[in-house]
Image (cartoon, grey):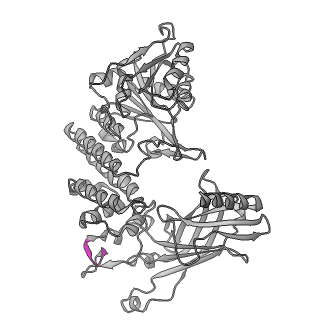
């Protein structure tokens, strides 16, 4: 039982228009810098919002008096002051559900905002379709860069009515609670609440409880929530702070509970889909970061993961995309962490499977000679556009001209069958997604490997090379994206593995007729992909070198 919160009420809301049907619950803790903006974004939604309930989770940074001052001038704002910090997000949201008087409720975190028109769009969909839930698109906005990434865009490509969640199993992929509008009496009638206290990933459980109650759901393509991602914040959000293994343990706990809730409700399809999502999303995301952690973390992470995966059955694995299944097989096959670099490449998006390419005695593709029971036979019949092809990339900045060199590896004969033709290489700006430079090069077979030739497989790689005018890119960080084209008419979009040979990934100053000079830094991302940082001109070069010197001095 949490202590009864004290409530400061604003003026009565009876005089508001009849269409004032929504309560926005804003929760916050020690976030005085942002909570005012969140509350104002909710109030700015207009007359559809009957009330905004701001729940302060016993902050000590001035959040509480700030909210009280806002409530004195805004009759629609009520402030709930928790007397003891809950340690999580679930209890404050439950307080909001309990305090709500409006027919519909939605949730907003103190460091995020609602875009204009979000409430009207959701309310129109819910009332027009007569649904218990309405859901729209959330965008993740990286700060301070402003780069935006849409969350689960496939689910919100167009307006749709889902009469039962099991008919749209992809709903389990959207575990967020904040991009949705809920009918208040639906939540109360079914006892749908968040886990109390410190329970990370509480929205996984809440969402499972909602889906288990089989609501009608209206989906809309409108952007209804802006999720601010502040990776440089002093106190990272739960979803961003993955440095400790307790975060992974909490994630597994939440996933397992969500699965049990769906299974107990008879929603076996949704339960299986939630496990497929774990393999394709959570497992791949954490694997990409494993080599950044210490040996103790890796051992404990591996043990936790093996124990959880041991509860999966063949049906759970069958629904997941191939990369997640392969990673799970490797983890289950070994008691200790192994092949982390290669596993990380499989976890990349798109997946890459790097050599060596082993085979079992009967010719079946396998992970490695010492893990022959981790089979990869799906690679023999998977469409070329989905294969985890491996391309190595070298970017060599030189005064006489920068060149990009790409090497495509054979993959159990599939590349030779499709016949590599050309590659389009694009440098895409990390922040705004624009393409700054596109190159096209022709693949040519490398000298045949004598061993492969004796086995009748021919060449084992193809190389393409082209000049790269990096001065055309301008400043910033640029990711390399590839589109491989084959003579059989198929294509494959992928990324390239950053080659780490001597002198390849180093900062270089090169002259430029257009910019004077360029400071060029090719580097490998966390997933091993090639990217490049560019600082043009003397001023840009000096600024980067100055920051580098400052870091060294400190």
503 shown above or below 538: below
Give the magenta-colored segment's residue range: 367-373
Q: Going 63% across and 68% down the picture, which residue do you hit?
A: 507
- Horizontally, residue 6 falls left or right of residue 13, namely left
Task: Name the quarter where the C terminus is drawn.
Answer: bottom right
Is any part of residue 366 visible from this angle? no
Residue 127 position, x and y percent, is: 43, 23
In front of the other: 399 or 456? 399
Residue 351 position, x and y percent, is: 43, 63
Task: Name the quarter where the N terminus is drawn.
Answer: top left
In front of the other: 261 or 39? 39
- Horizontally, residue 432 falls left or right of residue 497, namely right
In the displayed image of the protein, which residue is found farthest to the front? Answer: 553
Residue 215 position, x and y percent, is: 32, 30
Q: Going 24% across and 65% down the picture, which residue do you hit?
A: 335
Residue 275 position, x and y percent, is: 29, 50
361 shown above or below 38: below
Q: Give the quadrant of residue 200.
A: top left
104 shown above or below 387: above
Is any part of residue 323 visible from this angle? yes
Q: Is residue 371 magenta?
A: yes
Q: Give the quadrant of residue 372.
A: bottom left
Which secondary structure class fits the magenta region best? strand
Q: How many marks?
A: 0
């Amino acid at each position: 039982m949490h202590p009864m919160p004290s409530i400061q009420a604003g003026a009565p809301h009876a005089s508001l228009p009849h269409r004032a049907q929504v309560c926005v619950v804003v929760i916050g803790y020690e976030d005085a810098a942002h909570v005012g903006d969140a509350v104002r974004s909710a109030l700015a939604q207009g007359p559809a919002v009957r009330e905004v309930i701001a729940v302060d989770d016993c902050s000590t940074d001035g959040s509480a008096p700030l909210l009280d001052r806002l409530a004195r001038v805004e009759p629609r704002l009520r402030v709930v002051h928790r007397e003891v910090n809950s340690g999580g997000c679930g209890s404050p949201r439950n307080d909001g559900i309990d305090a709500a008087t409006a027919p519909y409720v939605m949730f907003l975190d103190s460091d995020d905002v609602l875009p204009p028109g979000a409430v009207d769009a959701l309310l129109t969909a819910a009332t027009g379709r007569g649904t218990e839930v309405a859901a729209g698109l959330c965008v993740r906005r990286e700060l301070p860069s402003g780069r935006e990434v849409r969350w689960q865009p496939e689910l919100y490509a167009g307006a749709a009515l889902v009469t039962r969640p099991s008919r749209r199993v992809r709903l389990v992929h959207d575990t967020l609670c904040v991009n949705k509008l809920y009918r208040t009496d639906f939540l109360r009638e079914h006892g749908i609440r968040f886990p109390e206290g410190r329970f990370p990933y509480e929205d996984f459980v809440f969402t499972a409880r909602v889906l288990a109650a089989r609501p009608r759901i209206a989906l809309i393509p409108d952007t209804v929530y802006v999720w601010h991602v502040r990776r440089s914040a002093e106190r990272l959000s739960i979803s961003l702070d993955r440095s400790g293994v307790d975060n992974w343990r909490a994630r597994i706990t939440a996933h397992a509970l969500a699965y049990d809730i769906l299974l107990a409700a008879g929603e076996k399809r949704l339960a299986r889909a939630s496990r497929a999502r774990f393999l394709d999303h959570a497992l791949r995301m954490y694997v990409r970061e494993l080599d950044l952690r210490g040996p103790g973390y890796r051992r404990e992470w591996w043990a936790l993961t093996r124990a959880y995966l041991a509860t999966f059955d063949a049906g759970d694995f069958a629904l997941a995309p191939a990369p997640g299944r392969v990673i799970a097989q490797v983890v289950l096959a070994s008691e200790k962490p192994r092949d982390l670099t290669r596993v990380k490449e499989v976890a990349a998006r798109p997946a890459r499977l790097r050599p060596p390419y082993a085979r079992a005695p009967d010719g079946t593709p396998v992970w490695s000679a010492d893990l022959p029971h981790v089979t990869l036979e799906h690679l023999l019949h998977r469409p070329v556009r989905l294969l985890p092809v491996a391309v190595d990339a070298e970017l060599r900045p030189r005064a006489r001209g920068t060149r990009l060199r790409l090497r495509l590896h054979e993959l159990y004969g599939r590349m030779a069958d499709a016949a590599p033709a050309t590659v389009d290489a694009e440098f895409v700006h990390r922040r705004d997604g624009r393409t700054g430079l596109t190159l096209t090069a022709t693949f040519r077979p490398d000298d045949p490997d004598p061993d492969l030739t004796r086995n009748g497989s021919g060449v084992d790689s193809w190389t393409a090379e082209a000049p790269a005018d990096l001065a055309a890119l301008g400043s910033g960080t640029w990711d390399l994206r590839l589109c491989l084209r084959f003579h059989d008419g198929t294509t494959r979009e992928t990324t390239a593995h950053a080659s780490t040979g001597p002198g390849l990934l180093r900062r270089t100053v090169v002259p430029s007729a257009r910019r004077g000079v360029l400071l060029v830094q090719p580097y490998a991302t966390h997933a091993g992909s090639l990217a490049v940082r560019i600082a043009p001109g003397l001023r840009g070069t000096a600024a980067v070198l100055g920051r580098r010197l400052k870091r060294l001095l400190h």
